[in-house]
Structure formats: structure tokens, C-alpha cells
Image: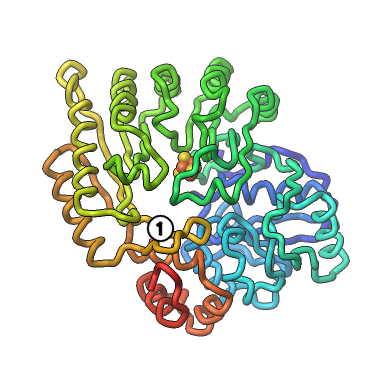
Amino acid sequence: MSGARGVFDYPVTSDAKRITLLIPADRRSTVDNLGWQSVYHLLNSDGRLSVIPLFYENGVLVDIDGDTANPERIVLTSISYEINAITFLSILNRFLGGCTVYAGGYAFASNPYFLSGVIAGSSASEFDMLTAGERTAFIDAVVSGERPKLFDGSTIVSASSSGASPAHSVIISPHSAFGNAFVIEVNRGCPFACRFCEIPSVRTLRYTPLAEIKKIVTQIPSDIRRVALVGSALASHPEFTDMISFLLGAGYEVSFASLRADMLDGNAIRLIASTGTATLTLAPETGSERLKKVLHKSISREKLIAAVTAALDHGMKRFKCYYMLGVPGEEDADVTAIADEMNDIMTAAKKDAPKRGWMPIVNVSVNPYIIKRTNRKPDDVFIDKSTWTKRTRMLSKALAAIGGINATFHDYHEARLEGMLSFAPAEAAIFILHEKLYEASYKRIADRLAKEFPIPSYT
Ligand code: SF4
């Protein structure tokens, strides 16, 4: 199969008005995102609009099969990550002259102020969270050639989530991270409250019951044999293991978004391993008990080791561990604690290696702690560059001494800019456009913004 295809037949008429749904990122990283797919579904379901998704790859706009395409006059954009807003500004300047643009998506909902000065329909709501009446009003206006006034309100996320969006793919594409998989959203929101995470504050917790998942599965095209389960708290779903058993029993390969280790018991790991999943992803974030409490994410070392041991016993050969540097109150000793924790994990991993005949591949990914609009505490400060450099060197050296670990460190300037964009005012977007900064490096953009628009925690 070479191209993408839809799951539903929409009642779109031949004279339907064409509009663009712009995702300012490449297809591989975004095609499976159910956020924009929901908007696509809700607009096409009306029948009077024909929605054409466009992506941004190698400096041009492309359709879902990768062919170069131009935008329509009405453009909705879905911005999931703050950094994509910079890409959007570049696209706005190069391709969207004369278009009426509306915005939504996770990052936009988190800070709608930044793009409000450059997008006509400012203060946009998340389209799939609007009431059916609000969505119809939008479509009515587009069809009659008016500028829709739908997004003029101050509400960012309507309280009246209608549940109208399907909790699954409406487009399946081979050009995606999961690769021709049918994606099912197992949950939204999260029952936990990790200090650095925006999800609990911007998403209402919702689980898709297994009974509903069984109905969803009947819509999977017969030649699609892979199901990807996504959600921010997959393993906390009360029917998580039953769900995997059901999908395996129905003959599907199953893939997962990342899983929280402390929610996985031996049985869950056995089932995950039996899907053919080779990588166990762990996100302890920090190594010391003190900072685990600061982060409100206390995955104990014992639980991590138990998860790793169970995964090895069931043949999983890869581990990915996520840590952060720059956690509020962090000292050099906390960096050493990360290496200690990894040493304990590696000791457990090496224990039965001779008997097994193989060693797991272990990757450690280290990111700066990013302070966002929704989680900032008054005394939070983004880690300065010299401390970041010093601590990344310390950690890199300590992990190298353990052996068998591939460590990667996130780009400091990208993380800093991501955090800054979470707070940036409307004037900052206008400034970036005016100065053509969207073509500059993340460092240069962040430095200029810090000078012109001092942002708490980042100056
Ligand atoms: S468990 Fe994950 S999704 Fe939930 S609050 Fe923590 S980081 Fe966010």
C-alpha cells in the first residue's frame, strides 16, 4: 500500500467548499495525531466542507501523500508543540498571504496569546472541544463566505466537550511513526500530577472503555493488522491488560505510546512483550528521592528494577530511560543520583546476561526541565547554560563509566525556546515575523526574545 486512506466515507458534496487543515510539521511525526484528525472528521462529517490536510516537509507544503500543494483561502492550523509555532510563522509568511487563518491544537490552547496578533480569529478554541452548534456556526460562515466569528470568545477549551470526536484514526497512512497502524486513543488527560506536565491541567481525564474499543475495532479495514494504543496514561486504564489480550486474540499486532513503569506489573509486561514490543520506555525523570518528590513523580528504584527485570525475562531487548536536568532545587548530588539509579538498573540488566546470551540496548535521553505557563512556580528558573553544560558533562562521564548506555542530551536552546513560547505575548510573534527570525537558529530566536520580551523564569 503506498498512500493514505480514510476510514469513513463522508457525505461531502461535489460543490463542497474546500478548506485547508494545516499541520506545520512533517507527516511522519504528526499523521497519527488524533487531535487534527478529529477536526478533519468533524468538518468533513457536515458534508458542506471538503478538508485537505497539508503538512510541511523540506520547505514546502505537501498533501497527505507527499505531493506539493497550495493552501485554500480558509486555513485551520493545528499546533501541537510550541516549537511548531515558529514553523507556522515561516509558513504564514511564505504561503498564507490572502488566507484567513484559524488556529487550534494543544500548544495553541496552552498559549493562545502568542499567535493572537498574527491570526485573524484569535483566542481560538480547540475545534473538537466546541459544541456541535458552535462547529455548525463556523461551517455556516465559511460556506456563506463570511469570516467565521466563532473563535472570538475568551474560552480556550469549552467545558462542553461533546465527545463527538472518534477516539481513533480517521486517516491511516504508511508515512507515520506507527506505519499503517490504526490508532486508538485509550485515554486523555492523566490521573497523576507531575510538576512539569501540562496534561492534567489542560485535559480532562477520560478513558475509552474496553467495550467501546471492541466497537471501534469493527471499523478497522480488514487489511490493517496493526493497532497503536495512544494516551497520556495508557497503563492506568483499568482494563489495560484485558485490552491487550483482546487485541492479540483478535489477531492484531499491538504498539504503544510510552508507558509509565510503576503502573506495569509482571503480567502487564508479559503481555506487552508478547505483542512483539521490543522496547520498554521508562521515565523516572530524576534519580534522587528528594527530587522525585519535588516532581510529584515518585517511581521508586525498586519499581524500575522490577520492571526492567520482568521485561528482560520476557525477552524485551531495549530500554529507553528519560531523565531531566534543571529540576527546581537540583544540586550536583542529584545528578550523581541519576547515574546511581542507572547503575542499579544496569546491574540488574547484566545479572542474567550470560545465561540469556545477550545484553539489552539501553538508551538514556536527558532533557532540560522546561517551565511552562501552566506549571510555573514563582521561584522556578530555567537551568542556565553553564550549569547545563557542567551537569551534562558530569552525567555523560558517569554513564560512560557504567558502560553499555547510549546517552543523548536534548538541544538546550530548543528546550529554552519551547518554554519561552509557552509564555510569549502576541507582540513576540509580530516581532519574529517582522525580523524574519523564523529563519534563525533556536538560540538566536530565544536570545532576541529574552532581550525584547523578558519572560519570567527565562531571563
Ligand atoms: S504521568 Fe505522564 S502524562 Fe501524567 S502527569 Fe506525569 S508526565 Fe504527565
Residue 71 picture location, percent across and down? 66, 66
Q: Please, which colouring scheme is shown?
A: rainbow
Q: Which residue appears at 22% of the width and 62% of the height?
A: 389
Q: Is residue 370 visible?
A: yes
Q: Quadrant of residue 66?
A: bottom right
59, 106: nearer the viewer:
106
Q: Is residue 171 left or right of residue 237?
A: right
Looking at the figure, which quarter contains the N terminus?
top right
Q: Is residue 248 left or right of residue 387?
A: right
Residue 269 picture location, percent across and down? 40, 22
Q: Which residue appears at 26% of the width and 37% of the height?
A: 362
Q: Is residue 243 left or right of residue 456?
A: right
Q: Is residue 418 visible?
A: no
Looking at the figure, which quarter contains the C terminus?
bottom left
30, 280: nearer the viewer:
280
Q: Quadrant of residue 118?
A: bottom right
Please name the amino acid that badge 1 sits on: Ile
Residue 418 picture location, percent across and down? 44, 63
Q: Which residue appears at 34% of the width and 42% of the height?
A: 292
Task: Identify whether 275 is placed above or below 191.
Answer: above
Residue 267 picture location, percent across and down? 43, 17
- Count neighbours of disc 1 (C-alpha within 10 A) and say few if under 14, some if 14 to 19, many if 20 or more: many
Circle 1 SS class: loop
Q: Quadrant of residue 91?
A: bottom right
Which residue is the site of mark 1?
370
